[in-house]
Image: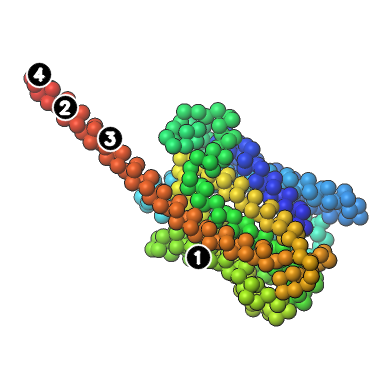
Amino acid sequence: GAVQSATLYVSYAASALLGSTAIVKSAGAKNSLAVGMGIYCVYVGCFALASLLMDRPMVAEAVALGGATVGGLAGGILWTAQGSFFARSAEMHSLFAGVTLPDATSDFGANFAAIYLLGEVALNMLSSVLVEAFELSWVAVFIIYFAIAVVSVVLMLLVHEYPSTENDGDSSDIDSRSDTNTTTPNKATATWRLLTEDPKMICMLPFNFVFGFAASFRASFVSREVVRIALKDENSKYIGFLSSVTAIVAATMSLVFGKVAHVFGKGTILAIGVLSFFLVAFPFILFPELENWGLISVLLIYIFQGVGRSTFEGTLKAVFADFFPYEKEGAYANIVLQNGISNALGFYLSVNLPCSSPGKYCIKYTDGKLHNVLVFEIIVMITAVLAVIGYWRASSLFAKEATESSRERRNEEEKVAFVSTDVQIDEQSVT
């Protein structure tokens, strides 16, 4: 439930803040991916174990919360490493294919998001087939998923390895982008120092937060309560279908946005994503009577979430590769940190915004308690507006940095040319 989800995301955020960057910088992106995936196997195994212990609720709950903690730690390592591997792959593609780095990150972001999200759809459908068609128990399903996870780790070991980032430019001096300190403490704190020392990262924070808030709002309110009331679905029969729609839309739009970004820029794509997250919550302010909602209107919410998610999984990662090339691990660990905090906070708010009497915005959940959904909806929308402003500011800072860097390079080239001319004059004088 919400407690397990909150536990998962707290652990997820903590891992990004307390050492995932050090692991990735020291072990390399590929090895760290394998480590994160290996720990994820334990997370999947905990689902099977908890299912076996359903006749002992307290023990099953402890196993589930323990699994959520382990899963969060695994996710922090995995997604930090994935971001580093993504950025390095884009750099190599740019170098050998003769395309610009922004174009390479845009294409790679779109392709990664599409493959990742289609894989999610396939595995969601597999669970439905195994349960409905083959009548397997959830214990059996989780064991099968555990086996798939183990095979994935083995296959990861066969992937090409990039050198570790020991000498890749540490963030110990963010302003000078120097490589002066590669000690373990500096590697471990790269996430925090990048967040506090590079103003672009603070500006990008609302985008990560609006994704987390919209995702937790959709999961805790729309999927659990709106679907139940509007579609009279007490047994959550529609949830699998609706969740698949979100993933399919996200996968499809990732490919579309990857092409569109070449023409209109990544900022336009992120703005579309933010608008989509805004529209996940806004319709419930205009039409709060859930009994009047139908399948089409509910489906639109999942479509909006899918469009927004496509920009988070693809375009945002490409933008981070562009904005923070000097600190790849710290940049992607910040996505993990901010997304983890926002999701944990979102799930906390979903069950801790009480109200006194039933009404349009005071909904009785399945837990029997009254919940104020209006506040949560406003939070999602305000964060969406801040995300647009934040990206605009970060983009302006990035453009300014690029201009200053170009000016410095020209000055250096002029100095070199001047010194070369002086040397030639001196040689001619001696002659």
Disc 4 crowd rating (10 Å Cα; few below 14, some 14-19, many 20+) is few
Q: Position of residue 171 (x, y in %)?
A: 50, 36
In front: 105, or 6? 6
Q: Could you tell which of marks 2 and 4 lies nearer the N-terminus?
A: 2
Q: What colouring style does the render use?
A: rainbow
Image point 59% across, 35% down: which residue? 188
Which label sits on residue 1? none
Disc 3 from disc 1: Cα separation = 40 Å
In front: 67, or 331? 331
Disc 2 crowd rating (10 Å Cα; few below 14, some 14-19, many 20+) is few
Q: Which residue is mark 3?
A: 412
Pick the quarter of the image with the C terminus: top left
Image point 80% across, 57% down: which residue? 140
Q: Which residue is mark 1?
A: 272
Q: What kind of residue is marked 4?
A: Val
Q: Position of residue 96 (x, y in %)?
A: 39, 47
Image point 55% across, 61% down: which residue? 384
Q: Could you tell which of marks 2 and 3 lies nearer the N-terminus?
A: 3
Q: Could you tell which of marks 2 and 1 lies nearer the N-terminus?
A: 1
Q: Could you tell which of marks 4 and 3 lies nearer the N-terminus?
A: 3
Q: Which residue is mark 2?
A: 422
Q: Is residue 240 visible?
A: no
Image point 73% across, 79% down: which residue? 291
| Image height of 193 relative to 103, above or below | above
Q: For the residue labelled by badge 4, is the local secondary structure a helix, a strand or a loop?
A: helix
Pick the quarter of the image with the N terminus: bottom right
Disc 2 from disc 3: Cα separation = 15 Å
